């Protein structure tokens, strides 16, 4: 075939090529890892999570103290006095308030979870516009790539997310943010 030499296979673009072409500087992995570690230290497990065996003892002990104080007050008070009943109700109210205000909460520690997301849902997921724009530029330039949203969860509440971009076995960090501000973001000085 005379034209076989003119047709060469199209070399797939690599992530590094697109980053250079668009002049995108990613968030260094060291920054992401330091941030993730700091957030885990910031949102540790609660006291009762570490001492789960003491929680039933504390609750049963408080009920025992309530019964003992009511019985003791009943024994020293004249027959027909309402003070033991009031003392028992007050003690029950104190324990109820401790439970209501979370003194006996046994919340676990926080954990990082990652999930695949689509480029058109980034704003709905709370990704700031500059980070979402960079993600879309890369996603259009490299078909078949994936966006990974990492989220710090504590009792199913999302605390501090980040966004990764993955293509052909390579992964980069595009941005880190919390609800109020962008902590670190890839910079894009090329054309969109």
Image (tube, rainbow, N blue to C red):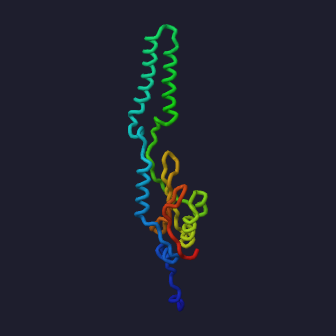
Quarter of the figure with residue 58: top left
Q: Is residue 192 above or below residue 79?
A: below
Q: Is residue 140 above or below residue 44?
A: below
- Residue 108 location in percent, x, y? 44, 43
Q: Nearer the viewer, residue 8 or 105?
A: 105
- Left or right of 69 in this view: 126: right
- Residue 155 location in percent, x, y? 50, 45
Q: Nearer the viewer, residue 147 or 70?
A: 70
Tell me the residue at 50%/63% (across/down): 175
Name, please, the residue furthest toward the bottom. 2
- Residue 83 location in percent, x, y? 50, 15
Q: Is residue 7 above or below residue 45?
A: below
Q: Is residue 109 above or below residue 22?
A: above
Tell me the residue at 46%/17% (across/down): 70
Tell me the residue at 45%/22% (across/down): 66
Tell me the residue at 49%/61% (across/down): 183
Quarter of the figure with residue 45: top left
- Residue 81 location in percent, x, y? 51, 11
**What quarter of the picture does the C terminus occupy?**
bottom right
């Amino acid at each position: 075939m005379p034209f076989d030499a003119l047709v060469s296979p199209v070399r797939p673009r690599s992530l590094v090529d697109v980053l250079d072409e668009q002049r995108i500087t990613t968030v260094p992995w060291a920054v992401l890892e330091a941030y993730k570690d700091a957030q885990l230290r910031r949102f540790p497990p609660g006291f009762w999570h570490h001492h789960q065996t003491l929680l039933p003892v504390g609750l049963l002990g408080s009920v025992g103290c309530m019964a003992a104080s009511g019985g003791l007050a009943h024994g020293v008070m004249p027959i027909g006095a309402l003070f033991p009943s009031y003392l028992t109700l007050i003690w029950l109210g104190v324990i109820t308030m401790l439970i209501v205000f979370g003194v006996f909460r046994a919340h676990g520690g926080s954990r990082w979870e990652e999930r695949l997301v689509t480029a058109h849902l980034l704003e709905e997921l709370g990704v700031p516009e500059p980070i979402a724009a960079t993600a879309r530029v890369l996603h259009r330039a490299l078909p078949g790539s994936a966006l990974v949203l990492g989220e710090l969860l504590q009792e199913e509440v999302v605390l501090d997310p980040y966004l990764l971009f993955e293509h052909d076995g390579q992964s980069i960090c595009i941005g880190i943010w919390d609800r109020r501000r962008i902590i670190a973001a890839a910079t894009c000085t090329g054309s969109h």
